[in-house]
Image (cartoon, grey):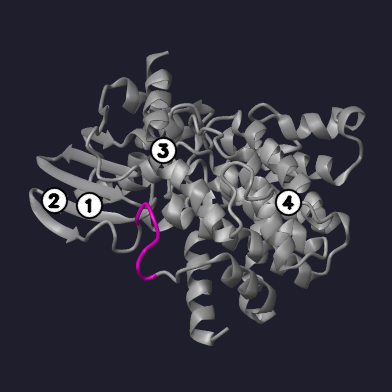
Amino acid sequence: MEKSLRQSIIDLIKREVVPAVGCTEPVAVALCVAKATETLGCLPEKIELFLSGNIIKNAMGVGIPGTGMIGLPIAVALGALVGKSEYSLEVLRDVTPEAVEEGKRYIAEGRISIALETDAPSNLHIDVRAQGDDHSVRAIISGAHTNFILIEKDGEVLFEKSAESGGSDTASSADPELNMQMVYDFATTAPLEEISFILEAKNLNLAAAQFALKGEYGHCLGSTVLHFGEKFFGDTPVAHAITLTSAACDARMGGAMVPVMSNSGSGNQGITATMPVVSYAMDINASDEQMVRALVLSHLTSIYIKQSLGRLSALCGCVVASTGATSGLVYLMGGGYDQVCDAVKNMVANLTGMICDGAKPSCSMKISSGVSTAMMSAMLAMQGFAVTSAEGIISDDVDETIHNLTSIGRDSMQATDKLVLKIMTCK
């Protein structure tokens, strides 16, 4: 593979695999509020937010780090009070108990209003309008979680660009046009020193899992499997992978103040692309090189799938990330490209259609389904078994199979997405 292509893929991974504190949708809202507040130059007297449905869906029921609270209002208040836009998706890392109390007062004073933007140009769209000291500011993030497209003060445009410039619902024209063969070749042949940075994903997400196992976060799925699961799952690689992966998700969805490594704008996707691979690699005493290459294969496969699916959709992100994970697992099991393709087909035949009904503590249960399916799909592939083109939405070509999956999630499930949001907001 040419060095220029390798470098463009490395740049893509570094842009898509980044640390985040808290669920990325409310954190992106807090980031936009922080930027608006900084531009205003004072604490806003009033903040109005106009948000796309998928932002609202993914922020309604999730814990906000360091607060013991759920939902958007406290994320908005803290974005204004202590948020720093320079921290990007770690914008809330300076939250203190005192700031939380001040945030509660800010909310109680009725300074925040939140509305659905029915004609949002993107599934990921955040429009913040803040007022204070006789000035007004508008800041917009669209297309990607950190992609500012407009900053305006008192009607004067300070910054503006199109949503496609630096982040969009689908792949940017500047990104390399990935396919499964390219993903596999890169992960298995790139010089180790060029890709070893991916170990930071292991370090962050494993630390988050270990943190959760010492406390009570979310639905405590990770600690439940660890302490009570041997009777049902045994002391097995599947049990270990479910424990570590769901524990990291428990911490994140439960509002723990711990960073995780995200993938394509989602912390849960980053966790799911990382922890099954890390867990199995530790179980088999894999070498550092095997760990690195398996993680790169997993994360880059996930990025490839998200390029055509989009940032947010009605399809649960664990479908994407666990498909990445099965690729990494196959590599660790000694499989090659053909076995990776078979495992991907097995995943698409199984998990396609799992809905996203927002970020919340029970995401750990969906992630666990993805983990066990990833292991099963890899195991079948290693034994020479794969779902064939005579079955369902599977094609002979693995890339066509992936695009069958993403077209369903991106296009056919739009009505599902609207109904899910309606159900969630009308309960």
Q: Nearer the viewer, mark 4 or mark 1?
A: 4
Residue at horizontal 57 percent and vertical 72 percent from the top: 182
Whichever of labels 3 and 2 marks the residue nearer the N terminus, that label is 2
Per the rendering, the mark at residue 153 is 2
Q: Secondary structure at mark 4?
A: loop
Q: Position of residue 117 (x, y in %)?
A: 24, 34
Q: Amino acid at mark 1?
A: Thr
Q: Earlier in the sequence, mark 4 or mark 1?
A: 1
Quarter of the figure with the N terminus:
bottom right
**Precedes in sequence: disc 2 or disc 4:** 2
**Mark 2 closeness class: few <14, some 14–19, many ≥20 residues within 10 Å:** some
Kindly identify which residue carries mark 4.
386
- Residue that numbered label 3 is attached to: 412
**Which numbered disc flags the more N-terminal residue, 3 or 4?**
4
Q: Dot 4: few (<14), some (14–19), or many (≥20) neighbours within 10 Å?
A: many
Amino acid type, mark 4: Ala
Point out the stretch of residues depicted in magenta.
168-174
Question: 6 above or below 41?
Answer: below
Give the number of the mark in front: 2 or 4. 4
